[in-house]
Image (cartoon, rainbow, N blue to C red):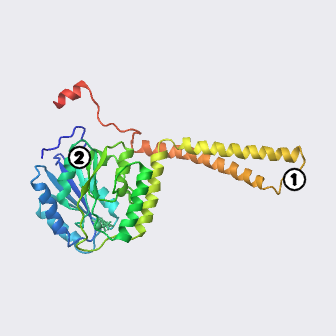
């Protein structure tokens, strides 16, 4: 495999030497898997012709993983351990790993050997075809049918509907990214699952390839059914961001105006009934409707205005442009790259 040369690559830390690949793995109580994991990752990359680094992020483990990681990171030159102070969750651990990753390509996977590190070169080869993100698809998933596969089937269907990103398997941790893409994204909650959706909002080219999947050999899963509900809430956030991020007033302002207009119309009618026709209106349901519509309209409208202000703060305080440039082409840049 040839080395990957990406134009446009922005290293997002201060180190000068940049490996081709950074493998980022969050680790929470995986002490038995760790030695196998480290070996498997380095075996898969050693002979690929790519330079690489392994970044293992200890997410406040309590089973000795921390100690083992510390020892291994001192012994090995291809391994760096980032030890978090406490357990923050998988998303935060991955974000920490991204922050320390220097590679042009960032590959993520789980630390429990369910993903197969031997698939890493395949993902990278696919990325080389001109994608920004390649996601793994666990075609033969080795997890419980009722507690895992069913919720995941429903979640995958929903996520596809909401995000417009067409993947079979959003939950697979084994993914490869071009590093610029990761540098652009901020992760909160459990949003690591939605990295493809977030990347899609940022204009990334996304694809998937089937990858191997194994049953958990050591330790146990860190999640139960409760995760499904958190995924649903995160999905709402993504939906909202995709739809309204740069134009909240278009939606809230519009519905606010319609609601206010309806409220005022009904109110005027009732005023007419009371003043001109001289009928009682105090006991009419329509009166309640008019009041509710008017208040809701004012609320929606002012919410839209507030959202506009927040949105401006969101983009401007972080220097986040509302667009993403893939490449700028001009004669001078072209000639210096030759
Ligand atoms: N993980 C983590 N912090 C947590 C929970 C999980 O870093 O609070 C890591 C865990 O060690 C593993 C990956 O995230 O490497 C996925 O976790 P798990 O295998 O339990 O999830 P599942 O495969 O059951 O979806
Ligand atoms: Mg797992």
Residue 111, how many percent across, how many down?
A: 24, 65
Q: Residues within 10 Å of mark 2 (few under 14, many from 20)?
A: many
Number of marks in picture: 2
The quarter of the rendered structure image containing the C terminus is top left
Question: Residue 232 lies in what quarter of the image?
Answer: bottom left
| Residue 139 position by quadrant | bottom left
Question: Which one is in front in this view, the residue at disc 2 or the one at disc 1?
Answer: 2
Residue 304 in view of the camera: yes
Please give the residue where the numbered disc 2 appears in the rendered image: 127
Residue under numbered circle 1 = 280
Q: Is residue 223 visible?
A: no
Q: Which quarter of the figure has residue 62? A: bottom left
Indicate the secondary structure of the residue bearing disc 2: helix
Q: Between residues 110 and 68, which one lies in front from this camera angle?
A: 110
Query: Where's ligand 1: which quadrant?
Result: bottom left
Measured in 3D between alpha carbons, the distance from the residue under mark 2 to the one under mark 1, in whole angstroms, is: 72 Å
Identify which residue is drawn at 42% across, 44% down. 317
**Left or right of 311, for residue 210:** left
């Amino acid at each position: 495999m040839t080395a990957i040369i990406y134009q446009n690559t922005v290293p997002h830390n201060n180190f000068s030497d940049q490996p081709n690949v950074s493998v980022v793995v969050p680790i929470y109580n995986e002490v038995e898997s760790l030695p196998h994991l480290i070996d498997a990752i380095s075996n898969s990359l050693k002979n690929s012709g790519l330079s690489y680094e392994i970044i293992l992020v200890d997410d406040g483990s309590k089973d000795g993983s921390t100690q083992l990681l510390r020892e291994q990171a001192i012994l090995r030159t291809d391994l760096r351990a980032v030890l978090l102070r406490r357990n923050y969750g998988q998303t935060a651990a991955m974000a920490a790993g991204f922050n320390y990753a220097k590679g042009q390509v960032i590959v993520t996977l789980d630390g429990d050997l369910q993903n197969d590190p031997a698939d890493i070169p395949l993902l990278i080869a696919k990325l080389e075809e001109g994608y920004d993100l390649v996601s793994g698809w666990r075609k033969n998933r080795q997890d419980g049918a009722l507690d895992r596969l069913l919720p995941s089937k429903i979640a995958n269907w929903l996520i596809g509907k909401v995000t417009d990103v067409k993947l079979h398997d959003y939950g697979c941790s084994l993914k490869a990214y071009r590093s610029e893409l990761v540098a652009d994204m901020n992760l909160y909650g459990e949003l690591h699952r939605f990295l493809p959706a977030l990347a899609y909002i940022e204009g990334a080219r996304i694809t998937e390839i089937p990858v191997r999947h194994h049953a958990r050999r050591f330790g146990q899963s860190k999640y139960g059914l409760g995760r499904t509900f958190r995924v649903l809430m995160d999905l709402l956030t993504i939906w909202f961001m995709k739809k309204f991020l740069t134009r909240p007033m278009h939606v809230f302002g519009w519905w606010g105006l319609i609601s206010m207009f309806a409220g005022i119309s009904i109110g005027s009618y009732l005023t007419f009934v009371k003043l001109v026709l001289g009928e009682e209106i105090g006991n009419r349901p329509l009166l309640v409707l008019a009041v509710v519509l008017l208040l809701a309209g004012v609320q929606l409208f002012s919410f839209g205005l507030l959202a506009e202000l927040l949105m401006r703060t969101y983009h401007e305080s972080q220097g986040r442009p509302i667009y993403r440039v893939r490449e700028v082409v001009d004669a001078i840049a072209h000639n210096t790259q030759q």
